[in-house]
Amino acid sequence: MVDGVTPCSKCHNLSEDILCSICNTPSRDESVICVVEDIRDLLAIESLGNFKGLYHVLGGVISPMEGIGPSDIYLQSLIDRVDSIECEEGKRVEVIFALPATMEGETTSFYLFKKLKDKNIIVTSLARGVAVGESLQYADEATLSRSLENRTIYEA
Ligand SMILES: [Zn+2]
């Protein structure tokens, strides 16, 4: 890791400050949180230029095969973060699952959904433009953009 670069205290993106440049932009909507596996996926979505919410970088996905459990990635900090957001009247927090369409990605989405489903929030997931097993960062921009645009309510 480069000197002076630490994870953003809010979204765990790489940052030179306590908050990264995305979390630090006042025009972005902090009530919309796009959950990604790693920073490369954040960059892939950010490069589309049309997402105005914030991110949450998990730093991995749940993988029993590799011994990665819920406490090994930034899951709890997402749940705490959702609880701390104060929405405007009549608005609800939206959490978007933008995790890979792999077994591990699905497991992670399902685990998170169980933790979030009793909160008064909206949980969505990327439309299935991204093929099964494919990482977000390898999807072409048009496909990724479409899956974000056409995201659907997550159903477990
Ligand atoms: Zn951040």
Image (cartoon, rainbow, N blue to C red):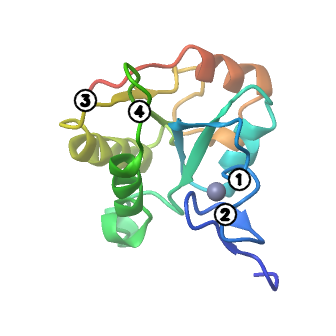
Whether pointer 4 and pointer 1 mark residues with C-beta atoms closer than 8 Å, the reply is no
Instruction: Name the residue located 41 percent from the left edge and 23 percent from the top edge.
Output: 91
Tag in front: 2 or 3: 2
Q: CA distance from mark 2 to mark 1?
A: 6 Å
The one of 86 and 104 positioned closer to us in this rendering: 86
In the rendered image, which residue does mark 1 sit on?
24
Q: Is residue 149 left or right of residue 94?
A: right
Cβ–Cβ under 8 Å for marks 2 and 1 = yes
- Whether residue 26 sits left or right of residue 128 in the image: it is right
The residue lying at 79 percent from left, 82 percent from top is 4
Q: Quadrant of residue 21?
A: bottom right
Q: Is mark 2 within 8 Å of ligand 1?
A: yes
Amino acid type at image mark 3: Ala
Return the x and y of residue 100 as percentages of the image width and height: 52, 42
Classify mark 1: residues with Cα within 10 Å, few (<14), some (14-19) or many (20+): few
Instruction: Estimate the x, y position of residue 109 in percent, counting from the top left.
Output: 36, 42
From this view, report whether residue 20 is shown above or below residue 126.
Answer: below
| Residue on which the image places disc 3 | 156
Q: Earlier in the sequence, mark 3 or mark 4?
A: 4
Can you say whether 7 is above or below 80 in the image? below
Q: Quadrant of the C terminus?
A: top left
Ligand 1 location (quadrant): bottom right
Per the rendering, the mark at residue 93 is 4
Residue on which the image places disc 2: 19
Which mark is first along the chain, 4 or 2? 2
Q: Amino acid at mark 4?
A: Val
Question: Dot 3: few (<14), some (14–19), or many (≥20) neighbours within 10 Å?
Answer: few
